[in-house]
Structures are given as C-alpha cells and as structure tokens.
Amino acid sequence: MFSKETYIKRRQELKRKVGSGAVVLLGNSEAAMNYIGNDYTFRQDSSFIYYVGLNTPDLAYILDIDNDKEYLFGDEPTIDDIIWMGNLPSLKERAAEVGINATEPSAGLSKRVSDALKSNRKVHYLNPYRYRNQILLSELLGIKIQEVSSGVSPVLTKAVIEMRLIKSQEEIRELENAGSIGYAMHIVAMKMCRPCMSERDIAGAIEGLAISEGNGVSFPTILSMNGQTLHNHDHSGILATGRLMLCDAGSENLNHYASDFTRTTAVGGKYSTKQITIHNIVLQAVNESIKMARPGITYKSVHRNAYRIIFEGLRELGLTRGDSEAALEAGAPALFMPHGLGHALGLDVHDMENLGETLVGYDEKIQRDTQFGYRSLRFGKRLAEGHVLTVEPGIYFIPQLIDKWRAENICSNFINFDRLESYRDFGGIRLEDNIAITANGCRPVYEKRLPITVDEIIEAVEN
Ligand code: GLY
C-alpha cells in the first residue's frame, strides 16, 4: 500500500474530474472455488485498490461530490471471523490508513445511494464484471440486472481511465518490482527448458516462484511447445529436442502491479537455422518497436511498423512476396501475427480491460480497426508520458489459419503458401518486454532485460 496521501490525492483528482453526483466504488467479495468457504485467493477490484488502497473483501466506498463527503462501508470482524481468519483491524482503523474519516456498516450503503437517487443526483459507477456486484448494484439502484450495464457512468469511466493510464513514479517502481519477479520466473523456465522435462513441471516451478515472491501470477501462465496457439494453457507436453518452448508469464507483486514477459526458447538451447532466422525477425520487431515508442506517436503506427518488419523479414525467406505497403493495407502480416503489438499494463495485466478495452486503448481521434489482425490491437492511441505497455510481436505458423487463407484465396498475392508447407510444425515465437513512455522516448520497466538474443538464451539454458 502507498502512503495515505497518495490515495487522498487520487480521490481529490477524481472528484475534480467527475464534478458532481456520488461516485460508488464497490470492492470485491470472496469468490467460491467449489463451495462457499473454499474460496479462490481474494483479489480486490483494481480501481478500488487504486482509490481506496484496502485489500479486504466486502468493502464499498462513496465519494459524495455534491456534499464534499466520503464514506467507507464495511462490517466489523465478528468473533467467528477472528477465530477462523485471525485478528483484523477495525473498519475505522482501516479507513484511517487511507485517509477516510467516515465509516458506516455495509447496510448503510443502500440508504446513502437511495438518498442520492431521491434527490435526483447522479450515481456514478463503473462496469461491474462480477455477478455479485451486478446483483448488488441492481438492488442499490432498484433496477433490473440487465439494466445495470447501460447505467455505467461514462464520466467516471473516462476519469478513471485517464488517471490510471498515467503511471506515477511510485507505480513504476512497483511495476519494476513485478518485473524483477517476472525475470526470475523466466530464468527458471529457461534453465528447465531441457529435453524430457514436462511443461507442467516448468509452469509449476515458475508459478510457485510467483507465489513465493509476490501475490502469484498476473494471469494464467502460457507455456507450451505449441506456441502457435496464442493463449495456450495446456501444459501436458514433454519437451523434445528440435522444438521451441514459448513461455508467456508474469507476476503480480505484493502491491498488485503486474508484469508480463514472453520468451521463446529452443529445447536444450539447440536452435535450428530456421528457428534462429525467425527468432531474429521477431527480435528486430521488438527492438525497433521499443526504439519507436515515444510521446505523440500512435501505438497503431508502431504495430504497423512491426507488421512491416515481419512481412519483409519473411519475404527474405520467400514466405511472403510483393510490395510491403500493399501487403500491409491488405493485412497480409496478420497470417503470421493475428494479435496486437501490446496492451496497457498496470494493476491489471490488460490494464482496466473491465472498463472497456476500446475505451482504454482508443479515443475520438484514433479509432479501432476492424480488419483481421489490426482489430486485435488492444491499445492503438497516441502514446503519452507515463503510459506503461507491453511490446510483444510474434511470428506463428497456425496450420488451420494457413489452410483457411489458402482455401479462401486470402492475400494470395502476398503469401507463398507452397513454401509455408515446411513450416506447419514450426510452432510460434513471441518476444515480449514491458516499457514505460518517458518525456522523450521510453524506458524498460525492469532492472535487467531478460536474455533475448539467441546467444543470450542459449547461455541462460546452459548455465
Ligand atoms: N500475456 C498474456 C496476454 O497478454 O494476454
């Protein structure tokens, strides 16, 4: 948790941005794994963490802008809570930690909201992504559950996105800390990337590390020899010489900030010439994208430039052909990279995706594309100092997609489908770093870059 001044300042800024009405922020509750009382590890709502800082279930907060008041709602721990879960500070003590003076029992939330509604004041709330909070909002507002999403406050959503998107120096330090844990996870994965090791052993080892050094993983680990499946959570493979292991993993640190790195390692560090060539095209794409990222430039144009590098690199190998500009217009590189170059990173691995991916990543000036490949870019707008993003180009050979494009004659003047036949069992390579946009460019969000060249990765595997 940061000092209480950080949260007070954030709430004052939120008040200024929203202007009037009452802001209701709902914390999360426990979520049952298979029955009540056996819960998933508690994860607080990220906007609640950002403004209120408290990491316990069943809290709510109201910022009554019109009356210049704020309240924290929750219940005092009962003797049963203390017997089973240990001693907990009182609600007043928890509120004081983050600079909130007024507290009320949870039951008071309903009266405060209905008072605001009765006096025709706007009640602002964010998009609820958990059913419990959808139900709670429907009860508080006296509307059907189906109507809750259409009442989400655009003003509050915009204000929260604007604030959370620009990371302060203290937040960047937290992200670096998450990055250090991510670094350790990936080094372990590289060292374990040996013939006959099971993917599950490696995924388990790095997730264990994430738990021992932080709050666990920031998303379910993607680790597989079948890296062409972009979000592959199947860890049933046994590593075999000649194959590549794609590992996309990151940690959530103790203050809930995320890291998200990807490295692709040849099993046992034994790379084929083909693998080295594809690796180097992806490496060029990640390095050039990082060089290009700076305030004022759109991430859409950085994504497009990565597509160009991939298209031209594959053209050298005879896998693609034709004019780059025309191929980019036609969307040909999306056959090899059907995902976007990156996304915002923060308290969530896809930061604030619950508020609306397009609202976070685009604006009035920079609209989301609809074309295959480009449309998967989660963040396309103009970069600004304080944005923290992933940079994650990749090249994948997805047999079903290749077959579909060939059968439907998609971009056939830019793709050499015959040559692609010998890449059907290649898998995929993705390389991913995390950057923070600075006044003049960008900087890495980690102390030490993970091994990324083929030579560096081989050294990591062997030593
Ligand atoms: N690193 C996983 C993702 O971005 O979805």
Image: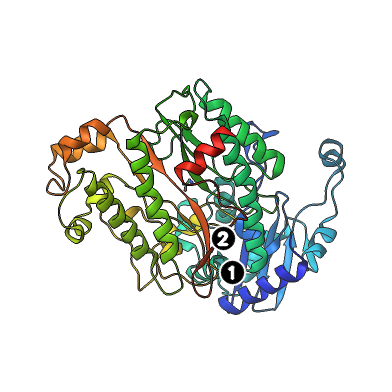
Element at badge 1?
A: helix
Q: How is the image coloured?
A: rainbow
What x and y, as percent, mark residue 391? Answer: 45, 55
| In this view, 116 is above or below 247 | below
Residue 425 seen from this side: yes
Residue beneath label 1, please?
Answer: 117
What x and y, as percent, mark residue 126? Answer: 54, 61
Disc 1: CA contacts within 10 A as few (<14), some (14-19) or many (>=20): some
Residue beneath label 2, please?
Answer: 141
The reply to whether the residue tagged 2 has its Cβ within 8 angstroms of ligand 1 is no
* Distance from Cα at disc 2 to Cα at disc 1: 8 Å
Q: Nearer the viewer, residue 328 or 24?
A: 328
Residue at image coords 73%, 50% = 56
What x and y, as percent, mark residue 48? Answer: 64, 59
Asked if the residue under mark 1 is in contact with the one under mark 2, i.e. CB atoms within 8 Å, the reply is yes
| In this view, 68 is above or below 406 | below
Disc 2 residue type (three-letter): Leu
| In this view, 86 is above or below 12 | above
Q: Nearer the viewer, residue 78 or 345?
A: 345
Residue at image coords 43%, 39% = 231
Query: Which quadrant, please, contains the N terminus?
Result: bottom right
Element at badge 2?
A: helix
Residue at image coords 20%, 58% = 324
The reply to whether the residue tagged 1 has its Cβ within 8 angstroms of ligand 1 is no
Count of numbered marks: 2
Disc 1 residue type (three-letter): Leu
Q: Nearer the viewer, residue 178 or 154?
A: 178
